Image: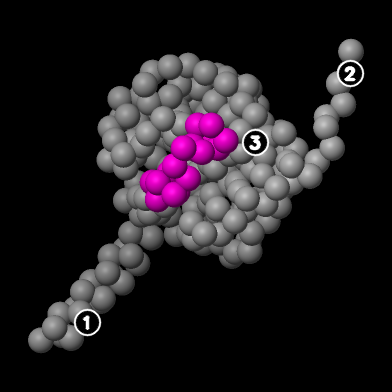
Amino acid sequence: MQRALAVVAALALATAMSGARAHDHAGHLQHEAAARAPSTVRIHLPDTALTDQDGRTARFKSQTVGDRLVLITFVYTTCTTVCPPLTALFADLQQRLGARVGRDVSMVTVTVDPLRDTPARLKAYAAQYNAGPGWSFLGGSKQAVDEVLNAFGVYTPNFADHPAVVLVGDPRSGEWTRLFGFPGADQILARLDQLQAARHDAPPAAHHH
């Protein structure tokens, strides 16, 4: 009986997953087929003004990110497919990073649906995952959000087709790693540690007057 129930549950899950993927079939599969393996990219962060889940406006590069290492992903609050597991992954990372969040590491979730994802919606969404200090949920004007999405190479005309991706980066060096799909927490933490080590090994920055 238990085995039969397990089979039924597995079939139900598979059916739900295939149905859930329908809305984002083209975009997600296109991105996953193009780049399953992690890719290293250079990203110049825009200093666009975005609004967080508490209604505070801050410049993306200079204030939200600052000089910290960064974990960033992209969601929308009404998504029922890839966004919940990506946000749950960040919730796990928040726990595992502990006091490093907000001090050494900025965790950032940017909405791809800024017209509907108001600060109040983002705040309610953040609360579902027990987001604490140092984990920002960002929206704002469509123009401002699109500027950030374009900088990270994740903009799509139809927001529901946005790629499932986590980016791990160091704004100081401009070096970022794109991890498509659902990377493991250990893989992300290992990349963070590599970036942290690279900072320690880097020569002091030259100061120009």
CB of mark 3 within 8 Å of CB of mark 2? no
Q: CA distance from mark 3 to mark 2?
A: 27 Å
Residue holding disc 2: 208
**Residue lying at 21% horizontally and 74% vertically, measured from the top left:** 9
Quarter of the picture holding the C terminus: top right
> Which of the two labelled residues, at mark 1 and mark 3, occupies the earlier sequence position?
1
CB of mark 2 within 8 Å of CB of mark 1? no
Identify the amino acid type marked 2: His
Helix, strand or loop for disc 2? loop
Q: CA distance from mark 1 to mark 3?
A: 44 Å
Give the label on residue 141, or none.
none
- Left or right: 81 in relation to 96: left
The local crowd at label 1, few if under 14, some if 14 to 19, many if 20 or more residues have their Cα within 10 Å, is few
> Which of the two labelled residues, at mark 2 and mark 1, occupies the earlier sequence position?
1
Q: Residue furthest left?
A: 1
Helix, strand or loop for disc 3? helix
Q: Is residue 96 magenta?
A: yes
**Residue lying at 38% horizontally and 60% vertically, measured from the top left:** 21
Residue 172: x %, y % from top left: 72, 34
Identify the amino acid type marked 3: Ala
> Which of the two labelled residues, at mark 3 and mark 2, occupies the earlier sequence position?
3
CB of mark 1 within 8 Å of CB of mark 3? no
In the picture, residue 187 is in which quadrant? bottom right
Residue 26 visible: no
Q: Is residue 196 above or below residue 182?
A: above
Give the label on residue 7, or none.
1
Residue 105 visible: yes
The local crowd at label 3, few if under 14, some if 14 to 19, many if 20 or more residues have their Cα within 10 Å, is some
Identify the amino acid type marked 1: Val
Residue 163: x %, y % from top left: 52, 51
What's drawn in magenta, residue-wise?
Answer: 91-110
